[in-house]
Amino acid sequence: MQRAVLISKHIYREAVDYLAGRVQLDYHDSDDGLPSADLLARLADKDGLICQLTDRIDAALMDAVPNVRVVSNVAVGFDNIDIPAATERGVIVTNTPGVLTDTTADLAFALILGAGRRLGESERYLRAGRFRQWRIDLLTGWDIWGSTLGVLGMGRIGQAVARRGRGFNMRVLYYDPLRQSEDLERELGIEYVSKDELLAQADFLSLHCALTAETHHLIGADELSAMKSTSVLVNTSRGPVVDEAALADALESGVIAAAGLDVFEHEPEVHPKLLRLENALIVPHIASASIATRTRMCVMAAENVVAGLAGHRPPNIVNPEVLD
Ligand code: DGY
């Protein structure tokens, strides 16, 4: 008998095509998530779920639908899913790493360039009809080339950002609780420093860590004060890694120069001060949003759920201990 899978929100067609014929599909083809009662009702007879980072998958949900054996997230991050609870209940959780690495790094770099060279502000200035003449100090910003890039979290995406930094002739420093091998450090041309040194030396600090209890508010008022007043903070990881209110205050009072943000602490809400501040370049969680990458993420999520339900080890299992 074919396994049954719920897709909680709209995904790319290629993934739906892959699933058709392999599983029995219940497709909620909408950008709006299902209210939790509807989600539970539709999961009552399902073996698997393809969900997105806006779906909260907690212990209570898993207890209510113990028939669901595989939860496949269409994202590399999985902080929306209670992993220990899933593991305890024998539920396989999968994610979509790798396929979005370079697309996300491109956007992180766009924010480095855009915040450093004041692109959002410049565009608003021009569109408002304020460009009357060239001026020696009109919208002057901070050089990217030759400056110091700090990468906090040297996983796949951090490495891809470091490569881009080296391409811009930047000195690249990094901190990660797990130091990379000397070979990789040499290949990428990166230097390992302490977190304090990273904060003190980076002209551009780019965050690339997963959201966990340890990384919640990793950057708060104290860390921002430890940064240069000319520095730029870029976040494409998860909003709660930064204390958003503290960041808004730091940008307003000139503790740091600018920020480029793709993610927010209480998405889709954005701190009202950030919406007003000219030195905050803000975009709506689009780091992996190229058509090709989002398509690959959806197909990968579909492959993961099919493999898991067929009794195979899914290629991108997050909690492999569940199979022990
Ligand atoms: C992820 O995959 O975790 C991103 O935030 C969305 O691409």
Image (cartoon, rainbow, N blue to C red):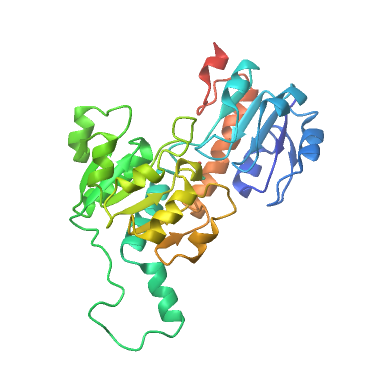
Q: Residue at position x 36%, y 35% from top? A: 155
Task: Choose between 176 and 40: the one closer to the eye.
Answer: 176
Q: Which quadrant holds residue 147?
A: bottom left
Does residue 47 show up? no
Q: Is residue 140 left or right of residue 236?
A: left
Instruction: Tell me which residue sits at (82%, 34%) in the image.
Output: 41
Image quarter (top left, top right, bottom left or bottom right) of the N terminus: top right
State the image coordinates of residue 159 (x, y, percent, origin top left): 31, 40
**Residue 59, x across and y down, in percent:** 68, 25
Picture residue at 29% right of the left edge, 48% below the top: 227
- Left or right: residue 39 versus residue 260 is right
Q: Nearer the viewer, residue 209 or 169?
A: 209
Q: Is residue 144 visible?
A: yes
- The percent position of residue 302, horizontal first and vertical second, equals 60, 36
Instruction: Say which quadrant the C terminus sits in.
Output: top right
Q: Residue at x 23, y 27 (%)?
A: 181
Vertical order, 68 against 209 (above or below): above
In the picture, measured across the screen, residue 67 lies left or right of residue 305, that is right
